[in-house]
């Protein structure tokens, strides 16, 4: 059920990228204005995450996730009545951003930490792959509907998917393994003690987790690197790949298919990354991931054309394998360094991811309006990836006095 929730959240959050061209053609709204709406969406998608983690501890997974799906449905259905650009900020930005944020990767981290003692990295990889699957399944039909029928039916499809998932969440999802009378995977049933129910102010717990994390250099290294991860995935490619490909003469449906293919390879890459995270120093993995991503962004401006060719397919494969492969090692480092606060701290690190995505989404739109192309945005993203690779090494140096993890070196 967690996989389905993450599946829906990713598909809903990625959908605006397929609707930007039709909205521009109907209303004449600039890429900068639409990018601002998407940026608000991305910021809330991240900033809501640590508070959602605290609310899950306090009120339970089912209540939080089902409420989030309703917000997404309201935002998507309400957008069909838009007549002014400020309404785009409300429906796309605030409602869909808040709803998808409550089902973000912090949900995967919560499940991995509650239900598993062993194989947490692999579990994070599998659940994170749910996001890629959501993009794979939802984005192409949304793009096809937007291009061939209209963007309003496409928005209604998103609303219908969100509402259809609500009863499944309420019927199937459970908060702790104890509700099924079992211990977490890898725990000794004879000695395992279930955690006490969380009480108190959930928002205060989220802010306390942030205050604790900011006193550690490792947090800043992880947060900045993950912000760059967001900038070079959701912000730059996730939002602007379709408009950029359209600039080169490619149809929206074809470009959406390529972006969905990124999701296909992301499934394999993220699961493999989770498996590796249980065995290899997560810092080394992050350095490799950011380096490969930077090379891809350097080459992208020369790869785009009006047709699909082998070099473009190679980019899709490499970028797909690398897309969110950073998530399992980053979540593992948060757990190792910050202990029981690790889930909430990861929520704040993920918030940085989305702030980076928002800045890149808006910045790339402005670059497109000013220069008439996305080339400089891609090269800027490549330079940021080099910085993220360096920061991933700093994480190791910032926790010399911490106990070693369970990975091989």
Image (cartoon, rainbow, N blue to C red):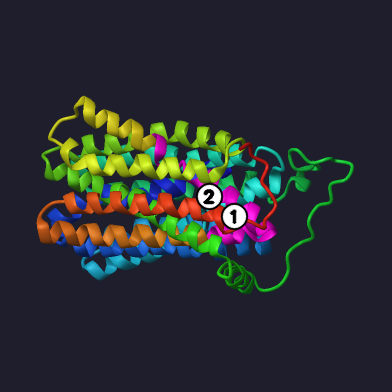
Give the extent of the magenta segment: 321-347
Residue 137 horizontal/vertical position (percent): 39, 36
Q: Is residue 328 magenta?
A: yes
- The C terminus appears in which quarter of the rendering? top right
Q: Residue at x 35, y 50 (%)?
A: 386
Which element carries disc 1, helix, strand or loop?
helix
Question: In the image, residue 278 lies at what x, y percent?
Answer: 62, 37
- Crowd around label 2: few <14 · some 14–19 · many ≥20 (10 Å): many
**Measured Cα–Cα span from mark 2 to mark 1:** 6 Å
- x 22%, y 25%: residue: 310
Which label is found at residue 357? none
The image shows residue 368, relative to residue 117, as above or below, that is below
Image position of 32 with respect to 116: above or below: below
Q: Cβ–Cβ below 8 Å for labels 2 and 1?
A: yes
- From the viewer's side, name the closer residue of 22 and 390: 390
Q: Is 148 situated left or right of 172 in this image?
A: left
The vertical placement of 140 against 156, above or below, is above
From what the image shows, is residue 237 above or below residue 122? below
- Horizontal side of residue 276 vs 84, given as left or right: right
The residue tagged 2 is 330
- Residue 330 among those drawn in magenta: yes
Under tag 2, what secondary structure?
helix
Asked whether residue 137 is in view, the answer is no
Q: Quadrant of the N terminus?
A: top right
Q: Which mark is residue 334?
A: 1
């Amino acid at each position: 059920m967690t996989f389905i929730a993450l599946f829906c959240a990713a598909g809903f959050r990625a959908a605006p990228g397929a609707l930007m061209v039709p909205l521009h053609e109907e209303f004449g709204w600039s890429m900068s204005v639409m990018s601002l709406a998407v940026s608000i969406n991305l910021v809330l998608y991240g900033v809501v995450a640590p508070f959602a983690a605290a609310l899950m501890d306090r009120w339970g997974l089912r209540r939080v996730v089902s409420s989030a799906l309703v917000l997404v449905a309201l935002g998507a259905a309400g957008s069909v009545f838009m007549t002014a650009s400020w309404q785009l900020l409300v429906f796309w930005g605030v409602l869909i951003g808040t709803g998808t944020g409550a089902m973000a990767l912090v949900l995967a981290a919560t499940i991995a930490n509650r239900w598993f003692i062993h194989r947490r990295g692999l579990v994070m990889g599998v659940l994170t792959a749910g996001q890629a699957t959501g993009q794979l399944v939802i984005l192409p039909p949304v793009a096809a509907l937007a291009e061939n029928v209209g963007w309003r039916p496409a928005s209604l499809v998103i609303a219908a998917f969100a509402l259809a998932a609500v009863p499944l969440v309420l019927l199937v999802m459970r908060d702790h393994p104890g509700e099924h009378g079992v211990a977490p995977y890898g725990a000794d049933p004879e000695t395992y003690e279930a955690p006490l129910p969380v009480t108190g102010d959930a928002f205060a717990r989220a802010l306390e987790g942030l205050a604790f994390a900011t006193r550690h250099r490792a947090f800043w290294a992880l947060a900045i690197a993950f912000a760059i991860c967001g900038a070079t995935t959701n912000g730059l490619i996730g939002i602007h790949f379709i408009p950029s490909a359209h600039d080169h003469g490619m149809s929206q449906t074809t470009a959406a298919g390529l972006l969905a293919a990124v999701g296909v390879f992301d499934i394999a890459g993220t699961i493999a990354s989770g498996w590796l995270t249980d065995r290899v120093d997560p810092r080394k993995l992050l350095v490799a991931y950011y380096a490969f991503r930077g090379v891809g962004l350097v080459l992208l401006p020369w790869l785009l054309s009006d047709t699909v060719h082998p070099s473009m397919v190679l980019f899709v494969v490499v970028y797909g394998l690398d897309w969110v492969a950073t998530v399992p090692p980053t979540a593992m480092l948060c757990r190792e360094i910050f202990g029981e606060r690790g889930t909430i701290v990861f929520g704040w690190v993920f918030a940085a991811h989305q702030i980076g995505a928002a800045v890149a989404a808006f910045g790339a739109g402005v670059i497109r309006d000013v220069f008439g192309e996305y080339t400089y945005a891609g090269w800027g993203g490549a330079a940021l990836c080099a910085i993220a690779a360096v920061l991933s090494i700093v994480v190791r140096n910032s926790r010399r006095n911490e106990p070693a993890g369970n990975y091989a070196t």
